[in-house]
Image: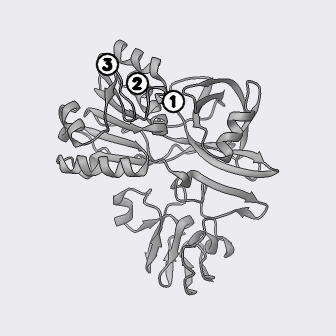
Amino acid sequence: APASASVRPQVPPPANAAAGSTGFVPLTVLAVRDETPTIRTFRVERPKDFAFEAGQFLTVRVQVDNKPLVRCYSLSSAPETPGYLEISVRRQGVVSGALHATLRQGSTLWARWPAGRFVYPEGDDRPLVLIAGGVGITPLMSMLRHSVAARPHRPVTLLYSARTASDIAYRAELTAIASVHPQARVLVTVTEESVAPPLLNGRICRAFLQAHITSPLDSVFCLCGPGVMIDDTARDLEGLGVPGPQVRREVFQAATAIGAIADAGVASPASPVASPAFTLSLARSNRTVEMPAGATLLEAAESAGATIPTICRSGVCTTCRTRVASGHVRCTSDALPEADREAGFVLPCVSFPLSDVALEA
C-alpha cells in the first residue's frame, strides 16, 4: 500500500536563523530575469543553513514610503539547488511593484526563514499531479524541479493554466523538463486567446482532468492558484472520486498582502464585526485576558504576554496554527487543511471569539 500523503512538519530553522528581533536576514541579489511581462524571478544568495521543502515560501521585508512592509513569496527553486534561492514575483501591488522597480544584481533583500505547510508529498510513490493557475505556478515549479531531481522514478504531471501565451512562466524550462525526463508530463493550457499545439486551449475543468489524468484515484494532487479556480478544481476532483486526503491546495490571493510593521508589531486584519468582549485563557502560558471587542485571538494573546509564533498575520502562512482547547471561534481563513480544522486548530491571527475561549498556547 502507498505511504500516507499527509503534510510533514516544517523544517525547523537553526538557532542562528533569527537575526535581530525580527528574524530577517540580508540576502544579496545575484541575478534578475523576466519570466513574463509581469512575473520577474529574483535569485538571491542562499545561506548554508537555509534548508527548505519544495512548496515553501520566503517572507520578505521592504521599505515603501519609509514604512516596512512584509509579504510572503513562494520559492520557485528546488531544495537541491546549492548556492541560491529564487522567488518569482508577479507585479500586482505596492510591495511587488517596489521589488520590480528597485531590486537589481547586488541589491539586498531582507528575508525570513522559509516556512509553509504546502509542501511536496514525500514518502509516497503514487503519481503526482501538479495543477497551477497563473502565478500559482511558482511553488509547483519548485516541486516539479525537486521531483525530477530527487524522485526520478515517480511519475509527475503538471497541468498549468495561463491567460495568454505571453503569461506562461518558465516556458522554455518546462519544455526541456518534459523532453529530458520521461516520467514528467507538462500540459499548458491558455484561456483567453487561441493558441496552436503543443499549447492547449480552455480551462482546467472536469473534462480536462478526465482527458489528461490517466489514474486520478491513484494519484496525489497539489493545487495552487486563484481561489475560484482551486475551489472548482477540488470539486471536480471530488466528483471524479478522488479522496480528499489526496488533494492539497494553496490559494494565491490578495491576502498575502500583510501590511505595515509598526514599532509595536504588525498591523493585523480588521475584524468584520465588532464582537462582544470575551475571556481568553492560555493554557500553557497560564494567562487569562479580557478580549477587547473586535480583537483577534493573536492580538489578545500578545497583549497578555504570550508568544505565538507568527509571520504573515493574515491567515496565509499558517505559522500561528494553534489548537482551541474550549470555546467557539470564528476563523476567517481556510488555509489550514480540513484534518487540522476538524482537530480544533485555528489561525489566531484571523480568528475571533464567539464565546469565552481557551487556547493551547
Picture disc at residue 69: none
Disc 3: which residue:
197
Q: Residue furthest right?
A: 66
| Amino acid type, callout 2 | Ala
Residue 78 x, y percent position in the rendering:
50, 28
Question: How far apart in space, not on screen, are marks 2 and 1 (Cα)?
Answer: 10 Å
Disc 2: which residue:
150
Q: Residue at x 55, y 72 (%)?
A: 284
Which circle, 3 or 2, is nearer the viewer?
A: 3
Residue 1 visible in the snapshot: no
Which circle, 3 or 1, is nearer the viewer?
A: 3
Mark 3 or mark 1: whose residue is earlier in sequence: 1
177 sits to left or right of 293: left
Q: Nearer the viewer, residue 138 or 285?
A: 138
Q: Residue furthest top?
A: 180
Residue 131 visible in the snapshot: yes
Residue 29 x, y percent position in the rendering:
71, 28
Mark 2 or mark 1: whose residue is earlier in sequence: 1
| Amino acid type, callout 3 | Pro
Question: How far apart in space, not on screen, are marks 3 and 2 (Cα)?
Answer: 30 Å
Question: Which quadrant does the N terminus fall into?
Answer: top left
Is 267 situated above or below 175?
A: below
Task: Please rate how many residues cluster around mark 2, counting C-alpha atoms within 10 Å: few if below 14, some from 14 to 19, many from 20.
Answer: few
Q: Residue at x 52, y 59 (%)?
A: 315
Q: Are marks 2 and 1 in contact (CB under 8 Å)?
A: yes
| Amino acid type, callout 1 | Pro
Disc 1: which residue:
79
Task: Please rate how many residues cluster around mark 1, counting C-alpha atoms within 10 Å: few if below 14, some from 14 to 19, many from 20.
Answer: many
Give the quarter of the image for residue 307: bottom right
